[in-house]
Image (tube, grey):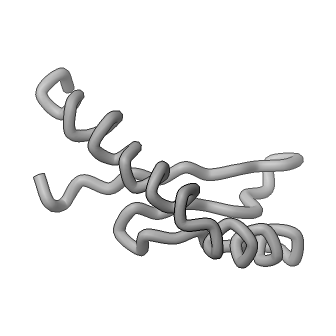
């Protein structure tokens, strides 16, 4: 169960501009706009904690279903 990864990506016009990766534990920006938002969102400990909790809520509780 340690190799399960939760990824939440944000797209605009079919271009991924920011992503949260549970393995990294932070947001990563892929465009100028995404980098600025990633820096801002990574400074918010409650936002990071909520996204880390999503791995347990979404992935670990549903691993047996698939």
* Position of 66 relative to 34 (above/below): above
**Residue at left 63%, top 67%?**
44
Q: Is residue 30 visible?
A: no
Say which quarter of the image contains residue 3.
Answer: bottom left
In the image, 30 versus 41, the foreground residue is 41
Furthest-top residue in this view: 65
**Residue at left 40%, top 43%?**
54
Q: How many marks?
A: 0
**Residue at left 18%, top 21%?**
65
Left or right: 50 as drawn, with respect to 33: left
Q: Residue 19: image x %, image y %?
A: 61, 61
Left or right: 14 as drawn, with respect to 43: right
**Residue at left 51%, top 61%?**
48
Q: Is residue 54 visible?
A: yes
Say which quarter of the image contains residue 46.
Answer: bottom right
Q: Residue 32: image x %, image y %?
A: 87, 77
Q: Residue 66: image x %, image y %?
A: 20, 26
Q: Residue 15: image x %, image y %?
A: 79, 56
């Amino acid at each position: 169960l340690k190799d399960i990864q939760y990824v939440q990506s944000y797209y605009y016009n079919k271009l991924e501009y920011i992503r949260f990766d549970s393995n990294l534990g932070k947001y990563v920006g892929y465009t100028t706009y995404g980098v600025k938002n990633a820096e801002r969102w990574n400074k918010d400990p409650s936002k990071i904690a909520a996204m880390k909790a999503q791995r347990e809520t979404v992935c670990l509780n549903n691993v047996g279903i698939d």
